[in-house]
Image: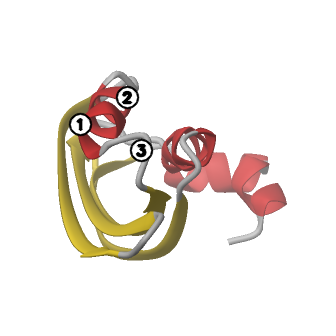
Amino acid sequence: MHRAWLRSSTYKKRYSMVKVKLLVLDVMKPIDPGTIELSKSLNELPDVHLVDITITEVERKVEAIKILIEGTDLNYEAIRKLLERHGASIHNVERVTTNKV
């Protein structure tokens, strides 16, 4: 989705009552930092209650991982930025659960 649309008032009005409760992300990250450090960092984000990381593949300097994140109102952009600060990149969003309040 285009970032300008995400910041638009139409988008905010339409989706302000919809909360993201669960994300499953396919991520590629360097070996360092480790998965425990990454998990703790993600868990410090607002509204994040649970982080589960599974390593799916290990190569020389990188790991392919699946990250399951549960919370009350997950902020995808904040999660993406935190992952980028750790040298990781999201390859795919495999699952999303939302609800309307």
Earlier in the chain: of badge 3 and badge 2, it is: 3
Q: Quadrant of the N terminus?
A: bottom right
Q: Are marks 1 and 2 in contact (CB under 8 Å)?
A: no
Q: Which residue is mark 3?
A: 17
Disc 1 or disc 2, which is closer to the eye?
1
Mark pair 3, 2: CA separation: 27 Å
Q: Nearer the viewer, mark 3 or mark 2?
A: 2
In the picture provided, is 86 more to the left or to the right than 48?
right
| Amino acid type assigned to the residue bearing label 3 in the image | Met
- Residue 68, compared with residue 28, is above or below; it is above
Mark 2 highlights which residue?
41
Labels 1 and 3: the sequence-earlier one: 3
Residue 99 lies in quadrant: bottom left
How many numbered marks, from 0 up? Answer: 3
Lateral position of residue 60 relative to residue 82, left or right: left
Q: Note whether 49 is above or below 27 in the view shown.
A: above
Q: Which residue is mark 1?
A: 36
Q: Which color scheme does this rendered protein use?
A: secondary structure
Q: Residue 48 at what x, y percent from top left?
A: 28, 32
Q: Is label 1 in a helix, a strand or a loop?
A: helix
Check disc 1: other Cα within 10 Å, few if <14, some if 14-19, many if 20+. few
User: Residue shown at 35%/38% (left/top)?
Assistant: 38
Residue 49, image quadrant = top left
Which of marks 2 and 1 precedes in the sequence?
Answer: 1
The residue positioned 66% from the left and 55% from the top of the image is 11
SS category of the residue bearing label 3 = loop
Q: Amino acid at mark 1?
A: Ile
For label 2, the SS is helix
Direction front: furthest residue: 60
Which quadrant would the C terminus be assigned to in this image? top left
Q: CA distance from mark 1 to mark 2?
A: 9 Å
